[in-house]
Image (spheres, coloured by chain):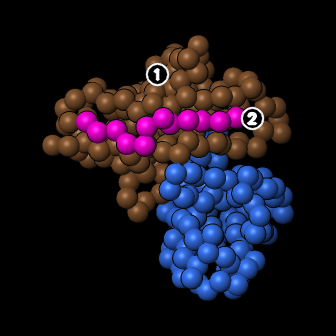
Chain colours: A brown, B blue
C-alpha cells in the first residue's frame, strides 16, 4: 500500500536561514511526488512535483525538493526562509506505474507546520 | 483557484440531518475529488469521480455519498450527519498530464 510520512509536526527556522521539511514515501512502483502549501483558512496550493528526470525539482516561491530513491525521500527545501513562508506543508504521492485506469488518487502526509521567525 | 468554487463555505448543522456540499468547476476537468482535512490526519480521500455518473469510493467513504450529473458539478452528501463528520471538506480537480490536483477553498462543516 502507498503511504507518506512527514516525521515532523512543526519546523521552526529563523528568517534568512535555509529550511527543510522532510517527507518519506512508500509505493510499489515508480513514485509521482508532490508538495502542497496551505495558508490559514485557504485551500491547498500546488508547489512542485517530481515525475521523472533530475532529482532536484524547482517549484513556486523559491522552493525546491530533492528526490532520493535509495532513501525513499522527497524533502522540501528553500535556501533562505521568509516569514511569509510560514504555513502548513503537505507531501503527497501516487504510484506512477498505473495504466490507463489510473485514477490519479493521491495519498497525503499528515502535514508539517513551518514557522519562520523574524 | 483553478476555477473551483465550493458552497457553502461554512455550515453548522445538527446530528442526524442530511447535508449536501457542492463543488463547481468551470474548466471541464474529467476527474474530481472530495477530501476531508482533520488535524493529525492530513487530507483523506472520501470519494472521487472520473466522469459524469462515474464515481468510486476513497479511504473514508462510510457515511458519505456523491453524485455527478454534470461535468461541472460534484456533490457530496452526508446522509445523516454525525459529530465525527465535523471537518473541513475540500474539493479538487485533476489537471495536467502528471496528475497534480488543484483545490477549492474548502467548506468548514460543524455538526452539533
Q: Position of residue B70 (x, y in %)?
A: 75, 67
The correct choice, above or below, for B9 with respect to A41 in the image is: below
- Which residue is identified by label 1? A66
Q: Position of residue B93 (x, y in %)?
A: 63, 53
Residue B102 in view of the camera: no
Residue located 70% across and 84% down the image: B16
Residue located 61% across and 86% down the image: B14
Q: Residues within 10 Å of mark 1 (few under 14, many from 20)?
A: some
The correct choice, above or below, for B41 with respect to A50 in the image is: below
Horizontal relation, residue B20 to residue A81: left or right: right
Of residues A20 and A46, the one drawn nearer to the viewer in this rendering: A20
Question: Splitting the image into 4 quarters, where does residue B37 fall?
Answer: bottom right
Kindly state the secondary structure of the residue where label 1 is placed. Answer: strand
Residue located 48% across and 52% down the image: A44
Horizontal relation, residue A28 to residue A56: left or right: right
Q: Chain of mark 1?
A: A
* Cα–Cα span, label 1 and label 2: 23 Å
- Which residue is identified by label 2? A1
The correct choice, above or below, for A19 with respect to B28 in the image is: above
Please provide the residue range marked out in magenta: A1-13
Amino acid at each position: 500500500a502507498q503511504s507518506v510520512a512527514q516525521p515532523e509536526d512543526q519546523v521552526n527556522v529563523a528568517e534568512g536561514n535555509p529550511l527543510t521539511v522532510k517527507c518519506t514515501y512508500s509505493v510499489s512502483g515508480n513514485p509521482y511526488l508532490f508538495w502542497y502549501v496551505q495558508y490559514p483558512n485557504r485551500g491547498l496550493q500546488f508547489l512542485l512535483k517530481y515525475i521523472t528526470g533530475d532529482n532536484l525539482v524547482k517549484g513556486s516561491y523559491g522552493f525546491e525538493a530533492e528526490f532520493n530513491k535509495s532513501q525513499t525521500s522527497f524533502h522540501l527545501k528553500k535556501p533562505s526562509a521568509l516569514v511569509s513562508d510560514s504555513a502548513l506543508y503537505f507531501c503527497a504521492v501516487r504510484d506512477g506505474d498505473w495504466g490507463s485506469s489510473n485514477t490519479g488518487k493521491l495519498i497525503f502526509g499528515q502535514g508539517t507546520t513551518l514557522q519562520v521567525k523574524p | 483557484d483553478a476555477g473551483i468554487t465550493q458552497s457553502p463555505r461554512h455550515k453548522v448543522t445538527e446530528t442526524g440531518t442530511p447535508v449536501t456540499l457542492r463543488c463547481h468547476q468551470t474548466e471541464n476537468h474529467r476527474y474530481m475529488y472530495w477530501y476531508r482535512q482533520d488535524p493529525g490526519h492530513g487530507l483523506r480521500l472520501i470519494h472521487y469521480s472520473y466522469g459524469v455518473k462515474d464515481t468510486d469510493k476513497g479511504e473514508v467513504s462510510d457515511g458519505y455519498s456523491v453524485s455527478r450529473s454534470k461535468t461541472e458539478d460534484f456533490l457530496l452528501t452526508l446522509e445523516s450527519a454525525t459529530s465525527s463528520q465535523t471537518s473541513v471538506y475540500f474539493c479538487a480537480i485533476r489537471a495536467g498530464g502528471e496528475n497534480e490536483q488543484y483545490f477549492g477553498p474548502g467548506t468548514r462543516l460543524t455538526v452539533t
